[in-house]
Amino acid sequence: MMKYSLFFLLVLSCLSASAHATPPSPIPVDTVENCEKLSKLQLDNAKIVNIELIEGNFTPPSKLADTLPGAKAKEIVDLPPICRVQLTIEPAINVEVWLPRKRSILRLQSIGGSGYAGFIPFDKLAIAVKNGYIAAATDTGHEGDLFDGKFVFKDGKFQIDSLTDFAHRSVHEMTIKTKQIIQSFYHVPLSYSYWNGCSTGGRQGLMEAQRYPADYDGIYIAAPAIYWDKFIPAEIWPQVVMQEELGRPIESDKLNKVRKAIIEFADEKDGIKDGIINDPTTLEISDELLNQAGLNKDEIRTLRKIWQGPTDQNGKPLWFSIEPTAPLDLLTSNEGPFPLPVDYLKYWIKQDPNFDWKSLGYKGFDEYFNQSVKMFAPIMGTDNTDLSRFKEKGGTDNTDLSWFKEKGGKMIIWHGLDDRLIAPKGSIQYYNDVLKTMGGSENVNNFAKLYLAPGVDHCSGGDGPDKIDGFESLVEWVENGREPTTLIAKKIENGQVTMQRPLCQYPQQTIYTGNGDTNNPENFECK
């Protein structure tokens, strides 16, 4: 499990830093008095269980801070003065709301979860309040780590209420209660509300836009875990293929050599030798290349079946695969499949804690995939392509703000093309389907945009520039009407920017002009 923990320490650091804006005059707040008064606030189906003033350093409670197996509570430093509110929404949804002492324009930034959630991302709350936001987050109704999917199965029964809380209810209820707390604390209405989430947090953001379009003005989404009913089963497909074709996993060293050979083969096709493939979806990889990289005939056949993506028994495609430039180690490990789909198979689908994934085979996988779609697409799919209510309404009920430039929600989605866990083609399909549903790009570009990030892994990491200014761009779009054309992506190593590229709005690609510094965004164009 150590390799999973190390990887997801990177995943949990994926959410973007909040935006900075030039505020009007500050709103004075007596933090002590206003914080104390919150203890008397009455909320429907919810109770404030703790209120405290925090300034400087804060150590999260270990019960909620153990976000990963073996992780320890880490001290957060240099916090501004805040009123920390702990809230429980019936039946067991834990929420944290952090209220800075003085704010100008009141902006809420709600933080999304990862995996199966089950924890509060305190580090992300800290980033948000340090950047001037009111911050909120929820454990979605259960406590555990992001690999633990058994919360929906208790006492031998499937818990539909726990599923509903995880799927959408917890975030919506958190949002309603947080806005009421903000009104009570500052005595003025909230100005803008933003969602910021990757992976499960991305799914949560899309769910808000689809089910509760008035909750947020701006929704920032990275590598969204949409089509949950399809991509979670797909994550176990590589292990099923290797079990059936070889009776064993392909060695990680071999797969790493294959990936390196593919990148070296295709590197300069986009005009730059930088270890990044601009569009891995178009690669044609020969058997000769795979053989030279160290695979035998059976391993080549197996790897191609993995890259093909899940199919039924007749070879009909069921879902997408990750791209050939993405690392395969988490999905093909000698330690077994990635934990999320294993728990999903045992507790969500089979509802048998003793079920062994190795008994699936191709026939069993076909049945498992179809059962997943049948059981969970309606509540977990998050693939409703009619976003018209979000486009028209947005999330702020305060219509008396003269600086409120335009009503209606705004959304930015980005996905790393080297994502090793969630196939980026799923996000591409969803966006294309939104275009079809809503009448084409002319009706979508003014409120929702998709960007693809070459060389970037799941939420962050990878060889490409993974620090993306999308959240800042979203805030500018919502508040000042500055519609983004490109996002700026940076690779930062040891505190230094080592690579910088623009990301073009899909379906355009970022193309080097052939002249000048390749780390200067001005030397690229969108085509």
Image (tube, rainbow, N blue to C red):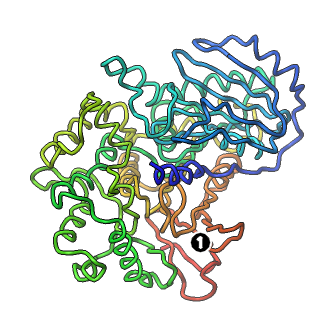
At 9% across and 53% down in the image, what residue appears?
A: 314
Residue at numbered disc 1: 501
Looking at the image, is 185 positioned above or below residue 474?
above
Q: Residue at x 59, y 72 (%)?
A: 501
Is label 1 in a helix, a strand or a loop? strand
The correct choice, above or below, for 139 with respect to 403 in the image is: above
> Crowding at label 1, few (<14), some or many (≥20) Cα neighbours within 10 Å?
many
Q: Is residue 179 left or right of residue 149?
A: right
Which residue is rendered at x = 36% and y = 46% of the image?
A: 437
x and y, in percent, of residue 301 in the image:
18, 68
On screen, 41 above or below 169? above
Image coordinates for residue 40, horizontal then vertical, percent: 76, 10
Give coordinates of residue 264: x percent, y percent. 41, 82
Give the camera-side residue of 16 and 52. 52
What amino acid does circle 1 point to?
Answer: Arg
Does residue 337 appear to the left or right of 182 in the view shown? left
